[in-house]
Image: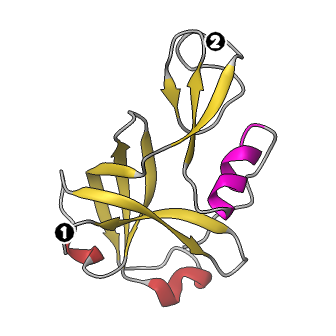
Amino acid sequence: MTAMNIENGDSTAYWEGARQGRLLLQRCKECNQVQFPPRHQCIKCWSADLVWFESGGRGTVESFTIVRRAPTAELREMIPYVVAAVSLAEGPRMITNIVGVGALEVSVDEDVQVTFMTDSAGRVLPQFRRIKQ
């Protein structure tokens, strides 16, 4: 899959973690809220006292769609592919892709595990694969 170049001051640690094969999330030191995507303040209490920690990389599929018609020319060779909302064990939701063997057979409430893939531009992206295949 591909992603726009969205690395910024709030997300630099996240993308560096991805390049190392680690899924990093933020936790607020004031209220313990875990958040994604990265921000400079807590989404619950607005504190700027955030720390990064490594996610266990497990989640559950909340919803998904199978893309069968490429929205851009660069995605044409990847169709069909799965775009999913994954609820991480730590709480936040990620919009991501389900990849690997049996990806098109994914179902709601299925457990998934993070994996990392490099796109055509050389960016390392967290994706998810089905645990049961």
Looking at the rendered structure, the kind of residue marked 1 is Lys
The magenta segment is 10-19
Quadrant in which the C terminus is drawn? bottom left
Q: Which residue is mark 2?
A: 46
In the shown orientation, is residue 52 left or right of residue 48? Answer: left
Q: Decide which of 53, 62 is in the foreground and name it.
A: 53
Q: Main secondary structure of the magenta part?
A: helix
| Front-lying residue, 112 or 69 | 112
Q: Tell me if residue 7 comes above or below residue 35 in the rendering.
A: below
Asked if the magenta segment contains residue 40, the reply would be: no
- Report x, y in % for residue 131: 25, 65
Q: Is residue 12 above or below residue 64?
A: above
On screen, residue 24 above or below 131: above
Mark 1 to mark 2 CA distance (whole Å): 39 Å
Task: Give SS at disc 2.
Answer: loop
Whole-percent x, y for residue 27 in the image: 56, 26
Quarter of the image holding residue 108? bottom left
Q: What amino acid is found at the position of numbered circle 2 in the picture? A: Trp
Q: Residue at x 66, y 47 (%)?
A: 14
Disc nearer the start of the sequence (1/2): 2
Dot 1 surroundings within 10 Å: few (below 14), some, or many (20 or more)? few
Label 1 sits on a secondary structure element that is loop
Q: Residue at x 18, y 50 (%)?
A: 109
The disc at residue 74 is none
At which x and y percent is residue 100? 36, 79
Residue at image position (63%, 64%) is 3
User: Is 80 placed left or right of 4 in the picture?
Assistant: left
How busy is the neighbourhood of tag 2: few (under 14 within 10 Å), some, or many (20 plus)?
A: few
- Can you identify the residue that label 1 sits on? 132
